[in-house]
Amino acid sequence: MYTTLADVRIEDLARFVAVFATAGAEIRSKHGSRAASIFAAEPGRVLVLIDWPSEAAFAAFRADPAVPDTMASGGTLAPPVFTALGRVAEFPA
């Protein structure tokens, strides 16, 4: 699995979540995304964890020409800053 953390500046949280859950979900699914979680970091900023099957799947998502327009429709103010994360361990609650 390949996990990314996206730091995203947004106009409005409700708008971002609505597009992320619909049009964004369609594009992520097309590229094999397995799960995604949104965290509110502060007003106008969210952090998004996305699990991908591979680095290649994430690269294909980033190269998809529909992605920038979809992000813009969700009210992103700038391209997200992505960081790749290596999961070291996962524990039950």
Image: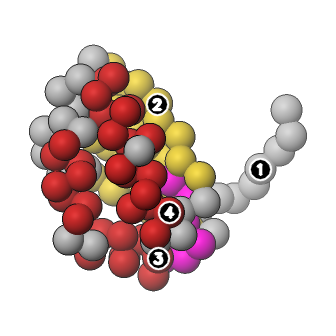
Q: Which residue is mark 4?
A: 29
Q: Which residue is mark 3?
A: 57
Q: What amino acid does circle 3 point to? A: Ala
Bin the neighbour count of mark 3 within 10 Å (Cα to Cα): few under 14, some 14-19, many 20 and up: some
Measure how far apart labels 1 and 2 are at the Cα level: 19 Å
Q: Is residue 70 visible?
A: yes
Q: Quadrant of the N terminus?
A: bottom right
Bin the neighbour count of mark 1 within 10 Å (Cα to Cα): few under 14, some 14-19, many 20 and up: few
Q: Nearer the viewer, mark 2 or mark 4?
A: 4
Q: Nearer the viewer, mark 1 or mark 3?
A: 3
Q: Which label is found at residue 90?
A: 1
- Identified at 55% across, 76% down, the residue is 54
Q: Nearer the viewer, mark 4 or mark 1?
A: 4
> Magenta segment: does it hold 29?
no
Q: Which residue is mark 2?
A: 39
- Figure quadrant of residue 60: bottom left
> Relative to 9, does residue 26 appear above or below in the rendering?
below
